[in-house]
Amino acid sequence: MPSLANFVTHKEGRFSVHVLATDKFRTRHLALKLSRPVQRETVTESAMLPYLWMEGTAQHPSALEITRYADELFGASVRTFINKRGNRHVLEVQASAPEEGTVTGAKEVIEKLEDLLLQIASDPALGDRGFLPEHVERERGLHERRIQSVFDDKITYAMERCLEEMCQGQPEGLARLGYIEDLRKVDKDRLWQVYQEILATCDVHMYVVGHVQDVQATLQRMMGKLHQAFGQGNAPDTKPVRALAIRNGDTREVVESESVQQGKLNLGFRTGVSYGDAEYLPLLVANGILGGFPHSKLFMNVREKASLAYYASSRLDGLTGIVAVQTGIEVGNKAQAYDIILRQVEALKAGDVTDEELDFTLRGLRNQYRQVLDQPMSLTEIHFSGVLAGIHRSVEDLLDQISAVGKEDVVRAAQTLELDTVYFLNNQEVNASA
Amino acid sequence: MREISYDRLHQTLIQDKLDNGLVVYLLPKPGFQQTFATFTTRYGSIDRTFKLQGAAEPTTVPDGIAHFLEHKMFEKEHGDVFPEFAKHGASANAFTTFDLTTYLFSCTDDVAKNTEVLLDFVQDPWFSERSVEKEKGIIGQEIRMYDDNPDWLVFFNLLQAMYKEHPVQVPIAGTVESIAKIDPDTLYQCHKTFYHPSNMVFFAVGGFEPKAMLQWIRENQAKKQFGPAPVVERIFPEEPPQVDAPEVTAKLGVSQPRCFIGWKDAKTGLTGPEQLEQEILTGVLLDALFGRSSDFYHRLIDENLIDQNFSWEYECAPTYGYSVVGGNTPNPQRLVQTVQTLLTEAQQRGVSEEDFERSRRKAIGRFITSVDNPNYVARAFVSYALRGADMFETADVLERITLEQANQRLREHFVPEQRSVSMVLPK
């Protein structure tokens, strides 16, 4: 296989620029990530900010002017959002546009797009003191609906509720978007205060993927722009993100009732293993055998054999080390589905793994990682997981390390799964204490 | 075999039509790791009633059968097809729409073997009473999952309001009641009728070697006997141009209402380049009117009538077509009134040259960046190809359409008799 593309990084204090030069795509991709600890006191403000940014910059002082300007840059797509990765809150702006030379008349589009991205995060439209009140008011209303919308997608809602219950009292359990009850006390001064604190202290990561002719020059140019946008600031004492520790005590059982046609059963397991650990790749393979693919135990047993569900899968969150199982079932089949799911986990732990299951899973995972090489934004996400976990693994490393995983490694890694929380969303009225 | 070069996109497409009628398109992408391959039949949820040449009577099949067939193709007498792909590191999937069924894989290894698995499993049906009964439980849960989804409900209710007879209004997976009627015989019959190679398209995009790929496909197909292509008349009921109902409301356990406003297209029956042009023209018009850069969008946001999930869509097929705008709203009735007032004003005044040019420019840029995404290219290319259009002409069409055409379309398409409204309200 030809050598796979890698990011080149330039780091100064809390600022990092990561550049991946490739001529495979007709599109330039940019991403700016501001990372900070997620905290109960500021989670809602911090979550609102990326959306508030799109209300206007000093140069383009309204949402309409920002989007019209982006359209001028050959339909550049510019989006902001909030992400939660382990115990970190990541405020993010992404942009993509056709590379210069792919469209007639596209000159300096990329430099303009870089500037727009930085202005959105660091140079907002301002009033007398801080944000414009009308921008804050509009965004407060929109953010309330953004939070409410999670409830309307019952698959996402059930997963979020399961994780929230599972990580009660820990930053990992805080809602990514924050809380409706906080919105009442969010005003422009409060937002401005949190925003200033973030600008001055967060870790700043800028990603560039595309036809970069001179990587060093791009690193220098972007670093200069970051300093201009965010000032100075020492490297914060950012600790690598670690997995949630195994919790002592009984499994939590949570049952909720809503008006739904289909019950949602979610099981959360803690493992104590995360992206930075040597055991991560064996655990990734174990999760793949359990529920990552259509050949996996959950799909084969819950869906194909028992005909109980349309979807039945598991996923490993690399930063928290949580393995989360999800399925949608007839409410009356909960006990049967629960039983089948637990039996699959027990089988995995007992070493009941066929050569085929292992082989298919290794191939499937390698296929996923190789495909990532065709997906610029996924490449940045994998790189950024390494940044957060404090370990650098190139896609090549990941492919090699997956290939080296054997059955005994899988079975050993599977022993780390501890059932923490069982969440069931049904359509029957239940006692609050049930 | 012929090669078509799209110079400005730096893409070269290879096209071939095999002796059995199968049309093959290959789009090599040097440097790409993955190969994304699709095998598609022109057969979807709307193909409910059809008449085979020589048959006395037309046949009507249960709703949801095209989708059911898609599920059941993955099971064979010797077991499941997924492990066959997994053995060669491929990720396989399938989907059914109103007018097509696509089987696909993506892989980074063993491309020849995966191509063979794809061609073979789609052309080799095997159904049993037991496996068909078992699938009813699985698809039943798929239907239940959609039943809880407000975006799905508001959309299908809108189609049911717009269409009186046309089967585009029928949910693609059918209903628990309709799929109960499906049996192996009907599945075999639908496969025989619609899965002949002359009714199918193979499309692959990615880092494969196109000459070799074409050779594998030719050899694979040459080994099989298909018999003459069935002559099938697809029968669609007479559909009045007006909508069936102006308004429909449902209730669901959600936090906020959803509201979709749809305009049934009176101008259907287009195929080929005309269809592509109508789709692109209407898309640019809808973006100029309702997109993120439009005055409308920001007025609706300012009046707290929409949020950022507000969107537009236009679908244009030979026997149906519609535009939809909408999303979450605290006040569906006011949203409908406001959109109508804004539209009426726009119809009188016309879309401005500035707005039209901005949307055109944006659409060109978005199209060029979309060509980087194999999954998107495969889906879009095949969908257009089956309607006789070439998606790689999108940029040329975008440069050709005029403001006058857009304004004419604005006045013709968005008329009150063609409009339906669908609302989903919190319980």
Image: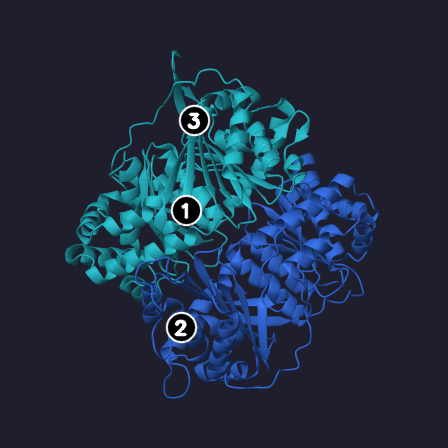
Chain colours: A blue, B cyan
Residue B139 at x, y percent in the picture: 57, 36
Residue shown at 60%/27% (left/top)?
A: B132
Q: Which mark is residue B199?
A: 3
Query: Is label 2 in contact with label 1 (beta carbons under 8 Å)?
Result: no
Query: Is label 2 in contact with label 3 (beta carbons under 8 Å)?
Result: no
| Residue that mark 2 sits on | A116
Residue at mark 2 shares a chain with residue at mark 3? no
> Of residues B348 and B332, which is closer to you in this image?
B348
Amino acid type, residue under disc 3 in the picture: Asn
Crowd band around label 1 with a 10 angstrom C-alpha radius: few (<14), some (14–19), many (20+):
some
Pinpoint the chain carrying mark 2: A
Does the rendering let one see residue A129?
Answer: yes
How far apart, in angstroms, are the residues tagged by discs 3 and 1?
26 Å
Amino acid type, residue under disc 1 in the picture: Gln
Callout 2: helix, strand or loop?
Answer: helix
How far apart, in angstroms, are the residues tagged by discs 2 and 1?
30 Å
Q: Is residue B233 left or right of residue B171?
A: left
| Residue that mark 1 sits on | B11
Q: Nearer the viewer, mark 2 or mark 1?
A: 1
